[in-house]
Image (cartoon, helix red, strand yellow):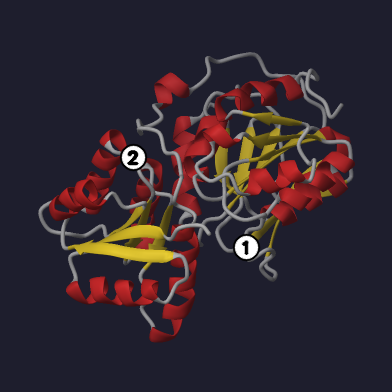
């Protein structure tokens, strides 16, 4: 039997610490080993208790949560779920937390009826943390990561579709940052709430040679542009004659997610077939695995991130079990494979 995830709660509010402890006590597979009112106390308790994961507030005395998170991921990397009063005005802070290494950012529910859904989502994240392998964190530097300016790669009707969940903000940045400006158009589905994706797209755009922006319904998919699914909407690929266009649509959650990687990949399989490349990155659950198989069956070239470089080897693992991936690659090898696909040197054979 899998042992429970041992969790430390760090929050300056005694009420919140009590509520989180009570909520997590109702979740299977979780043991709260302690609570701390500030990062300094939390630091000592991490050394003493050796938890599998922590929940972390942002606005705290003595040291703010983001500063603590950056120090923690540099010197003692471990799974961190930020639980804070995140509002649309604080989305840049939420993206900064993900960029610093948090596996997820959850907003504290402001209504009693939402506590159940919140605790279920938090519990699902924390149950996955035992055994997670997180590397010491150094931010991706734009000047160092960006590829030197290169001639436009000649591509004809090629599409790259990327899907990710937990750990995906860093993984996507590391895939996109080295790409040259003329790479094929890219569509990205990342499990991220509404309001966060604008800041994340802006962060990627500053980091990359290619243009990165939130997708708008009807956007043309062109070389050197990556379109990110807006939070809480599905992103699909459609055809308008010989032109590829993005569709941003509402609809039910698929495999518990909106945006869903499955929805994106299935649309790419249908509308691009052998002219597409699919990339499934780190994440919990199975979203995108079946869609990656559909892409491979349609003649696309497909890649799954390998276990050693994943924060959570969930979605790629399921895809590999379905024989959905033509290749299983470490994260740092994927950008070069995208370029090979663009130049015709990678295929679904």
Q: Quadrant of residue 252?
A: bottom right
Residue placed at 71% from the left, 19% from the top?
153
The dot on residue 77 is 2
Q: Which of 208 and 178 is in front in this view?
A: 178
Helix, strand or loop for disc 1: loop
- Image side of residue 174 versus residue 159, left or right: left
Q: Quadrant of residue 176?
A: top right
Residue 121 vertical position relative to residue 101 in the rendered view, above or below: below
Residue placed at 70% from the left, 51% from the top?
288
Q: Position of residue 188 (x, y in %)?
A: 63, 45
Q: Quadrant of residue 143?
A: top left
- Counting the numbered discs, the total is 2
Residue 188 vertical position relative to residue 91 in the rendered view, above or below: above
Q: Nearer the viewer, residue 286 or 267?
A: 286
The answer to whether residue 227 is visible is: yes
Q: Where is residue 194 in the image (x, y as percent from the top left)?
A: 51, 62
Q: Position of residue 3 (x, y in %)?
A: 45, 58
**In this figure, which residue is indicated by the disc labeled 1?**
258
- Name of the residue lying farthest toward the left: 62
């Amino acid at each position: 039997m899998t042992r429970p995830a041992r969790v430390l709660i760090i929050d300056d509010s005694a009420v919140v610490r009590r509520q989180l402890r009570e909520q997590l006590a109702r979740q299977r597979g979780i043991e709260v080993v302690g609570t701390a009112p500030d990062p300094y106390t939390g630091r000592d308790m991490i050394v003493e208790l050796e938890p599998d994961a922590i929940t972390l507030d942002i606005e705290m005395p003595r040291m703010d949560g983001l500063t603590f998170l950056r120090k923690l991921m540099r010197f003692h990397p471990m799974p961190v779920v930020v639980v804070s009063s995140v509002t649309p005005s604080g989305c840049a802070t939420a993206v900064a937390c993900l960029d610093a290494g948090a596996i997820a950012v959850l907003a504290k529910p402001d209504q009693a009826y939402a506590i159940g859904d919140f605790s279920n989502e938090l519990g699902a994240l924390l149950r996955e943390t035992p055994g997670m392998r997180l590397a010491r964190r150094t931010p991706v530097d734009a000047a160092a990561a960006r590829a030197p300016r290169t001639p436009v790669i000649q591509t004809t009707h090629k599409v790259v579709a990327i899907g990710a969940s937990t750990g995906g903000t860093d993984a996507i940045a590391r895939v996109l940052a080295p790409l040259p400006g003329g790479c094929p158009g890219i569509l990205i589905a990342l499990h991220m709430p509404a309001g966060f994706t604008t800041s994340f797209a802006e962060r990627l755009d500053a980091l990359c040679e290619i243009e990165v922006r939130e997708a708008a319904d009807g956007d043309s998919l062109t070389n050197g542009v990556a379109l990110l699914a807006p939070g809480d909407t599905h992103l699909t690929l459609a055809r308008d004659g010989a032109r590829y266009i993005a569709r941003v649509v509402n609809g039910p959650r698929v495999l518990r997610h909106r945006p869903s990687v499955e929805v994106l990949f299935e649309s790419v399989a249908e509308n691009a077939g052998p002219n597409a490349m699919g990339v499934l990155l780190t994440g919990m659950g199975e979203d995108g695995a079946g869609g990656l198989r559909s892409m491979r069956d349609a003649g696309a070239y497909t890649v799954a991130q390998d276990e050693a470089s994943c924060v959570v080897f969930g979605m790629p693992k399921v895809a590999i079990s379905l024989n959905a991936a033509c290749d299983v690659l470490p994260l740092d090898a994927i950008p070069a494979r995208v370029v090979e696909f663009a130049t015709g040197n990678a295929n679904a054979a």
